[in-house]
Image (cartoon, rainbow, N blue to C red):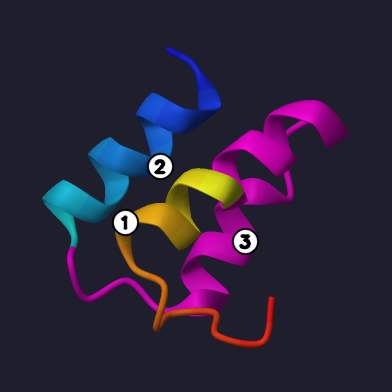
Amino acid sequence: MTARLTAAALLADNPNLTLQDLTDFASHMDAKSEDMFWAKVREINPTLCPDW
């Protein structure tokens, strides 16, 4: 599963995930995957990380 699909699945299954929950999950990814993960998170829920 790609990082973008992972982000979409996580947020679909757990809409109340916090920024800290997502940060903990992303900490196990390589840099490129983490960038794609956060891009998808921001696409799905831009209010979750408005400063980025």
- Residue marked by disc 3: 24
- Residue marked by disc 2: 7
Residue 11 picture location, percent across and down: 26, 54
- Three-letter amino acid code of the residue under disc 1: Ile
Image check: 19 left or right of 14? right
Residue at the image position 54 percent from the left and 79 percent from the top: 49
State which tag comes first along the sequence, 2 or 3: 2
Where 15 sits versus 32, above or below?
below
Residue 6 picture location, percent across and down: 40, 32
- Residue marked by disc 1: 44
Pointer 1 and pointer 2: residues touching (CB < 8 Å)? yes
Q: Secondary structure at mark 1?
A: helix
Judging depth in this view, the residue of 33 and 17 nearest the camera is 33
Q: Is residue 17 magenta?
A: yes
State which tag comes first along the sequence, 3 or 1: 3
Q: Secondary structure at mark 2?
A: helix
Q: Is residue 41 magenta?
A: no
Please state the extent of the stretch shown in magenta in the rendering: 15-38
Of helix, strand and loop, which mostly describes the magenta segment?
helix
- C-alpha separation, residue under disc 2 versus residue under disc 3: 13 Å
Residue at the image position 57 percent from the left and 48 percent from the top: 39
